Image (spheres, grey):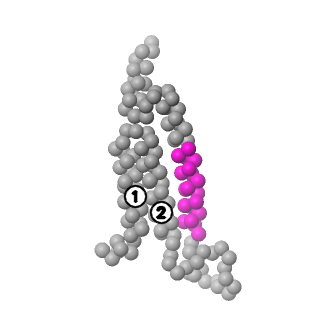
Amino acid sequence: MLTALCNNRIQVAAVMLFAVGFTTLLVHKNLLKKIIGLNIMDTAANLFLASIGYIRGRTAPILPEQGIVDASRYVNPLPAGLVLTSIVVSVATTAVMLTFSIRLYRRYHTLNIDEIYAITEKEQEEEP
């Protein structure tokens, strides 16, 4: 059991990072802290995918050497492509979340979810 953890230490670190991000997402009421937690979770998922796709001693199948036709000499390029796509989606999602946070702060002068909810409840009660 211990040797399996030592051999998969990067995957274990990725799972621990994901747990930290998920805990941050659940515990904190501040929207910026929630965005940071979600970014930690994204990074952990990317680390996990990249660590699974890497195989020691193999090369990338970009320009194969002359005469090597054995597929077992190359790593699978799919995890790297998934990680690159995930990074682009993470950046776009973070930009949208930060934009909405700025808009919320300008309207309610706070980023605390409970306070925003209380203000919206009060506004709805005041409307006829």
- Which residue is at 39% across, 64% downward? 13
Q: Report the residue marked by disc 1.
A: 17
Residue 91 is one of the magenta-drawn residues: yes
Q: Which mark is residue 1?
A: none
- Which residue is at 59% across, 80% downward? 71
In this picture, is 49 found above or below 55?
Answer: above
Residue 104, percent from left and from top:
49, 31
Q: Which mark is residue 47?
A: 2
Q: Quadrant of the C terminus?
A: top left
Residue 120 is left or right of residue 82, and the answer is left
Q: Quadrant of the N terminus?
A: bottom left
Give how far apart the Cα atoms at labels 2 and 1 are. 9 Å
Main SS of residues in magenta: helix
Residue 29 is left or right of residue 104, and the answer is left
Q: Amino acid at mark 1?
A: Leu
- Which residue is at 38% across, 70% downward? 9
Residue bounds of the magenta highlight: 77-95
In this picture, is 2 found above or below 18?
Answer: below
Q: Amino acid at mark 2?
A: Leu
Callout 2–callout 1 Cβ contact below 8 Å = yes
